[in-house]
Image: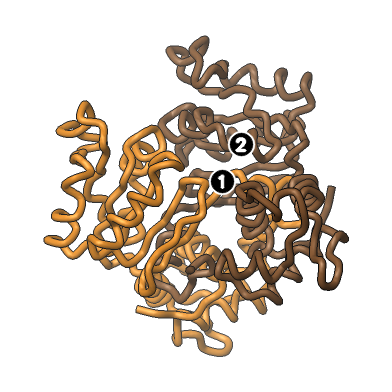
Chain colours: A orange, B brown
Amino acid sequence: MSKNITTQTLQRLPVYLNYLMSLSGKHKNGNISATAIADALGLNDVQVRKDLATVSRGGRPRTGYVTAELISDIGHFLGFENHDGVIVAGVGNFGKAMMGSDSFSAYGFDMLCGFDCNENLTGTYINGKPVYHISEMKNFCTNKNIEIGIITVPEESAQEVCDIMAESGIKYILNFASVHLKVPKGITIHNENISITLAMLARCNFHENNS
Amino acid sequence: MSKNITTQTLQRLPVYLNYLMSLSGKHKNGNISATAIADALGLNDVQVRKDLATVSRGGRPRTGYVTAELISDIGHFLGFENHDGVIVAGVGNFGKAMMGSDSFSAYGFDMLCGFDCNENLTGTYINGKPVYHISEMKNFCTNKNIEIGIITVPEESAQEVCDIMAESGIKYILNFASVHLKVPKGITIHNENISITLAMLARCNFHENNS
């Protein structure tokens, strides 16, 4: 699946969804306009109309959207009905936080298991998900056609783990190690550096989500 | 401090810095050109020139940059010489990962302590940083003029914790709870939702860092 959408729009979609799902009364079983959504969330109504048009063709002049259809369209767009398997490499505090989070499933991701080189961890469970030895990653991912991997190992091991993921058929890598990783063509990596996010927030003129 | 810079440029600055600091020989003690940096990192040289011009006035035609000056300029721009105090609210796995990370200090952030409502955690230390009861947050932050807070509490407590931060003089909030938080005017919040980042990476046409 490949869709062109801005980060800002994508970040607002779950906000719309939460709001729509919290509705009761006439809006829940009936229609709702982009203007009403904008007012409720303190957003610009032109922007809301544009955002919703990206994911739904249900908007009608005067009547707006059928609420149930709009909820279904946003969820469908975001892939909430998917069951995309995800694995985590590195079961330290960060990896445990990833494995322990129940929020992935709401977005259509199945957190399957973690991998670590520490043999004391292999065979244990975090939030009901097994931890395997890192040497089993390639077999596991190849057999189950896993395409999404999260890297939460220390910097010094990150490139090696990244290389194993590439050999394992992983197509999308979310990297939390604060080191820039190189991947072969055909693999998409997002290097997420929380210190940089913090620097952007506190030192630069960057506050897309300010409300 | 307020600077206008794109996310993409800011994310590349530490990459330049890592590369420059890894240099040896003539480049280390001499000059380096934007073209040489671009070649080494597999980036477009026009972009590199533009990025560097944002943070340094040291670039000269033909000779390029004095390496040591460029290192200093980038570090200065990113605030690496600062000592901005940061506190964490919520000492679960995610909060522990934040408190346990040594990468913040390289970016000029002093991770000071964590706060939690669990009394079994108060009085303990994570990576040498103390955990205090959440009821002490307001006093602590007010007395020490802390401006930066990270929220790693569960969704249901996030707004309450956010409100306490606002009352405590916190000006910048990085929120990892997957719920959209409201803040008073004058406070900047960045809602970081890892599931959405994953959805953008794996389902949308978004790969700014692909290399």
Please report contact status of discs 1 and 2: CB closer than 8 Å, yes or no: yes
Q: Is residue A188 left or right of residue A164?
A: right
Instruction: Using the image, determine if residue B139 lies above or below residue B189.
Output: above
* Residue at horizontal 49 percent and vertical 20 percent from the top: B126
Marks 1/2: CA distance? Answer: 8 Å
* Residue at horizontal 68 percent and vertical 63 percent from the top: B9
Mark 2: few/some/many CA within 10 Å (<14, 14-19, 20+): many
Q: In this view, does A131 lie to the left or right of A184?
A: left
Position of residue B84 measured from the top left corner of the image (x, y, whole percent): 74, 33
Chain under callout 2: B
| Of B152 and A22, the residue lying toward us | B152
Q: Which amino acid, by three-letter code, is at mark 2?
A: Phe
* Residue at horizontal 63 percent and vertical 69 percent from the top: B38
Q: In this view, does A27 lie to the left or right of B136?
A: left
Report the residue marked by disc 2.
B104
Instruction: Using the image, determine if residue A154 lies above or below residue A104.
Output: above
Position of residue B13 measured from the top left corner of the image (x, y, whole percent): 67, 56
Instruction: Using the image, determine if residue B82 lies above or below residue B125.
Output: below
Q: Residue A194 carries which label?
A: 1
| Of A207 and B207, the residue lying toward us | B207
Circle 2 SS class:
helix
Position of residue A88 measured from the top left corner of the image (x, y, whole percent): 31, 47
Position of residue B25 measured from the top left corner of the image (x, y, whole percent): 66, 50
